[in-house]
Image (cartoon, helix red, strand yellow):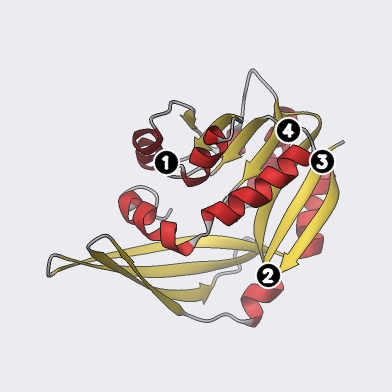
Amino acid sequence: MTQLYSTLANIYHEMYQHVFNYEKEFIFYDSLLKSTNSHKILEIGCGSGMLARRFLINGYDYLGLDLFNEMLDIARAEIKSDKFIQGDMRHLSFNQQFDSVLITGRSIAYIIENQGIMDTLTGIYKSLKAKGLLVFGVFEANGIFDNFNDFEQTIEHDNKKIKRISKLKKNLSTGWTYDWYAKYIIEQNNELYEYDDITTLRAFTKDEISLFLKLTGFKIKEIIDEEKTLTLIVEKK
């Protein structure tokens, strides 16, 4: 499992403020949630709370879940809120039901076994109220493997420069999976620090993820097909 969300959690928090447009992402979710009168929401893969901050400010009855306590510690400290719990999306169990569940940051990509996908979606189904909404993104297999290239990113945060060199290798052991090797080079106060990381990610074809949803009782309302990603808006039957 990647170190990006544990040992390197602070690097993630600093870097991804510049990688993702959280304000744009919140506006997308906010519009969907309001259109379905969703107020009580669960965010799976909430990370360091960049979306959580926006949901809470805008009055949602919010709960954030993440696998990594290091990420949740940052979220709690940043937002001064206890609306976060540690947990595995494959083993959801709540004494309450939600109007909507969001899996953000394409976090389902880390579930590479079919049974894990089924367990995740089944747990979400049980956690939703009738006609409840599930919104999540996946990497689209054709887009990923048609343009399967290494890449580099450099961002500056405060007085720190973070460079990430990413190399991809096909894996295909449990589906449309691939290994992501990343080297982080941190430059701060004229000193350099280097960290290596590796994780395995899963992409999906449109038909594949649609079948998983059908098997777990969801009705697809919309699939937004963008370059290398699919965003699925689905409803509990």
Q: Is residue 92 left or right of residue 163?
A: right
Decide which of tag 2 and tag 1 comes sooner along the chain.
1
Percent position of residue 159, x then y:
22, 62
What residue does disc 3 label? 235
- Tags 1 and 3 touching, CB below 8 Å: no
Q: Is residue 106 left or right of residue 84?
A: right
Q: Residues within 10 Å of mark 4 (few under 14, many from 20)?
A: some
Circle number at residue 141: 2
- Tags 2 and 1 touching, CB below 8 Å: no
Q: Residues within 10 Å of mark 2 (few under 14, many from 20)?
A: many
Circle number at residue 38: 4
Decide which of tag 1 and tag 3 comes sooner along the chain.
1
Between disc 3 and disc 4, the foreground one is 4
Decide which of tag 3 and tag 4 comes sooner along the chain.
4
Is disc 3 placed on a helix, strand or loop?
strand
Q: At label 4, which amino acid type do we have?
A: Ser
Q: At label 1, which amino acid type do we have?
A: Phe
Decide which of tag 1 and tag 4 comes sooner along the chain.
4
Q: Residues within 10 Å of mark 1 (few under 14, many from 20)?
A: many
Question: Quick check: can you spot residue 106?
Answer: no
Q: At label 3, which amino acid type do we have?
A: Glu
Q: Residues within 10 Å of mark 3 (few under 14, many from 20)?
A: many
